[in-house]
Amino acid sequence: MELKSAQKNKSFRKKLLNIFKLSFLNGLGGNKNRKSKILATILFATVVLFLIILITGSSIFGISLGTGIIPFSSSLTTNADINNIPSGKRYPPVHGLNLYETKVTNSLIFPQIEHLSNLKKMGYKTLFIRRTDINGKSDYYVKNNEIPMTDKEKKQLAAEADKTAFIKKTFLDLGKVVYRRKRKSNSPSVVIVTLLDYEKYNLESIVQIVQNRVDYAQKHNYGTYIRWAQEFIPYLEAQSLDTSYEFIKPLIMRAAMHTFPNTNNFWFIDEDGLIMNLGLSLQQHLLNPKILDLATLKKVPLARGSLIKTYNSPSISIDGKYKDVDTADLIFPQQQQQQGELETFSFVLSNNLYTHAFLDYLNDPLVRNYDWGHNNPLGKAITHCLQWHPSLLKRFRMVVPKTIASSYDPVNSKFPVAENQKGKEPFYVDNDMVVLLKDCTKRHSCAEDLTQFYEEVKH
């Protein structure tokens, strides 16, 4: 049928072009009223071309009417753009890493942490599929076209004596969950994003991390997007958390933006950290224009020794109104231990075209697999990106670490701070918004430190 339709269109176009050709030759054939004939021919030719475009849906020089191909100038940047593609249906429906998804109305998304011990025992060999290419390289991968479990299937698998199949499907289905509400205004303004490593922490510590995020989100009507870091292993070339953990952060942030398409801001907090003041919203503490301006480090090098510096913005007009606050799309603290480098344990991203492009850049295998060095590879990749892309640098804010990235120092954090030094100390002290336990792995004290600070959280 499609072949016959194409042949009919081709025959129809040929007839129209023959009419146009005869008209053009007749228009130039006589000397009498030559000018009027030329004008009439041009007019007739214009009408014929318009009819061709209108009836057949052809695209000429990027102009398209009817149901023809998408104009070359179209920019498919949002879900609405892609969903409104003409009925030619040349593109599949919008989806994330999986083709099939489960829509939910609960903005608190996190894994079933009671499966932690089973996941440790099952390992990658059970959770994923092992595939070997023609060169003999063996990698883990997942099928992106598997349909999520229905409620009936969940009950059936959960009732089985061997829970392996149920736990595996639950593990894989978490990435297929998306938040959708009829009214966009019902979406949370902020979503807290966290990666969990089930090999690193015990169940008690995982409960504390998740509960900390959920408690904070519920207080301010925020959302949470918490997933196992191991879920992203098949999407990496270097399939090891020791090697690639830092570059899973851009992956989960992009997945979070797909899951919550109408949320404005996404706050990533590493599992080695806690929100210590649950009563203070992110808008009050950082995103408020005046506070963000005070916290921004202006005209400072992006990296140690770099000639490229942060912009002196946002600017303030004569009447005191902030002009450029809406362009603060990439908010990263400066590291406390190594000033001059970006902190990637806690940062805030807006949800728009620029941050999508930024994350897509970081998720490119060429960037992800480049040798950035062992120390802070993601921070160095971000710095490189900002140095070469002024359109992103304009939307970047480097803020003081005290805002959302105070690092715990087991020696200095225990001593009282002099009055004239409060707010300037390069380590975590009481009343700071966030505590990061960055070196707890080296100290072998992550669980102990986490429990200590979890008991000190201010509700």
Image: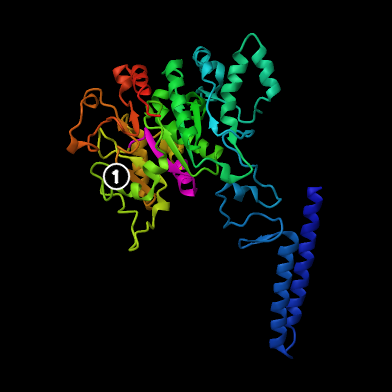
Q: Position of residue 385 (x, y in %)?
A: 37, 44
Q: Quadrant of the C terminus?
A: top left
Front in this rendered view, residue 422 or 357: 422
Front in this rendered view, residue 47 or 223: 223
- Asked whether residue 337 appears in the rendered view, the answer is yes
Is the residue 459 above or below the residue 401 in the image? above
Question: Crowding at label 1, few (<14), some or many (≥20) Cα neighbours within 10 Å?
Answer: many
Q: Residue at the location (58% across, 19% down)?
A: 168
Q: Position of residue 286 (x, y in %)?
A: 37, 43
Give the labeled residue for mark 1.
302
Q: Residue at the location (37% across, 47% down)?
A: 396
- Asked whether residue 387 appears in the rendered view, the answer is no
Is the residue 415 above or below the residue 351 in the image? above
Front in this rendered view, residue 236 or 223: 223
Q: Is residue 350 magenta?
A: yes
Q: Residue at the location (39% across, 50% down)?
A: 395
Q: Is residue 318 magenta?
A: no
Q: Position of residue 135 (x, y in %)?
A: 51, 25
Magenta highlight range: 343-360
